Amino acid sequence: MVRFRPLDSWTDPRGGQIERVRIDNGIIAMEVLSLGGIIRSLWTPDRHGERGNIVLGCDSIEDYLKQDAHLGAIAGRYANRIANGKMSFGEDEYQLDINHANHCLHGGSEGFNRKHWHMGQLPDGIRLNLVSPDGDMGFPGICNVQLDYRLVGNNLYMEIFAAVNKPCPISLTQHSYFNLEGSDSTSNAEHQLQIDTTSMLTLDDSGIPTGMIDASGSLLDFRRPKIFSIVQNDEELVSTSGIDHCYLTNGSGSEMTRFGCLSAPESGRSMTLYTNQPSVQIYGANHLEGNSGTLKAHHAICIEPQQLPNGANQPTLEADPWIKPAEVYHHISRYEFKTF
């Protein structure tokens, strides 16, 4: 049984109210905002059965609007980077909002993370809906999005459907910053990461894919769990200030496959991700410092299931992110929480 408790709303200085609701199934509890589909807090038990918050968040709407780290939000219309903010479909060319170096990152400066979503209740969770107008941040077509967060036992399910009335690439991801040691911890250093796949994208200095490689035997081979700091602080990753890399899941799109597991030795928490998305970006919060309050670089870890970065401009790659008017975009991910 899932219990629902509305919390006091926040007044958005841009206009309107930000709804807040807490849902709790007795094992997992979470607070969700109507701003950006944000998961503000996510409470899971440690090995002693004590629940603690394992995601980073802000204490006010003003702080959320100041930061550009997409804390806990849905990133879209297109997660990750689109090179030079340019893309084309047939004879139609599009210039998107440029908000990161020369690229469009996570849908632009006013992406889905900053939008007001309509919030409703499900028997086991929360449903949020958003209508993005034609031309929003340069993206073509009216885009209708349905986002469900559901608590089932020790699992958080995130499921997203989207449809457009013009061809448009869509890639939506949940951008929570996880620290499984709990909110008192300010470092991801002792976390251990395990990833089933060794297929990766090679990236240029600005994070745009240039090809694919097999990481077997390399620093970024996580088939056996590795302590995050050992990899993050290696000289090989100086240019990115740590891990900010994309792994290919080899998923079919129709069913979820296991991607890997993040664990924390002190709390005994683990989180295993299953997803139907073709790739997952691993980001070590390398540039988080200065975004809000006491947040620090390498404070947490983002594990972002998504379509391929710059997928709209990668015709040689297998995954095609362009959604046509007769099609429906579907993303489902399951986060399983256990202790050891």
Image (spheres, rainbow, N blue to C red):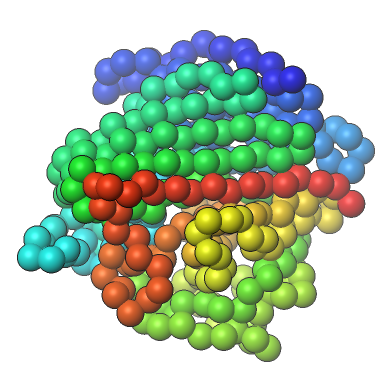
Q: Residue furthest front?
A: 326
Q: Residue furthest right?
A: 48
Residue 154 coordinates in the image, percent (x, y): 76, 38
User: Is 117 placed left or right of 72 in the picture?
Assistant: left
Q: Say if 50 sits above or below 165 in the image.
A: above
Q: Say if 255 sits above or below 19 in the image.
A: below
Between 277 and 286, the residue placed more toward the observer is 277
Residue 121 coordinates in the image, percent (x, y): 53, 19
Looking at the rendering, in which quadrant would you find the N terminus? Answer: top right
Q: Say if 172 sits above or below 283 in the image.
A: above
For the point 39% across and 48% down, the residue is 329
Q: Say if 105 sits above or below 162 in the image.
A: below
For the point 57% across and 85% down, the residue is 214
Residue 48 coordinates in the image, percent (x, y): 92, 38
Between 208 and 123, the residue placed more toward the observer is 123
Camera sees residue 242: no
Camera sees residue 321: yes
Residue 299 coordinates in the image, percent (x, y): 61, 52
Residue 83 appears in which quarter of the rendering? Answer: bottom left
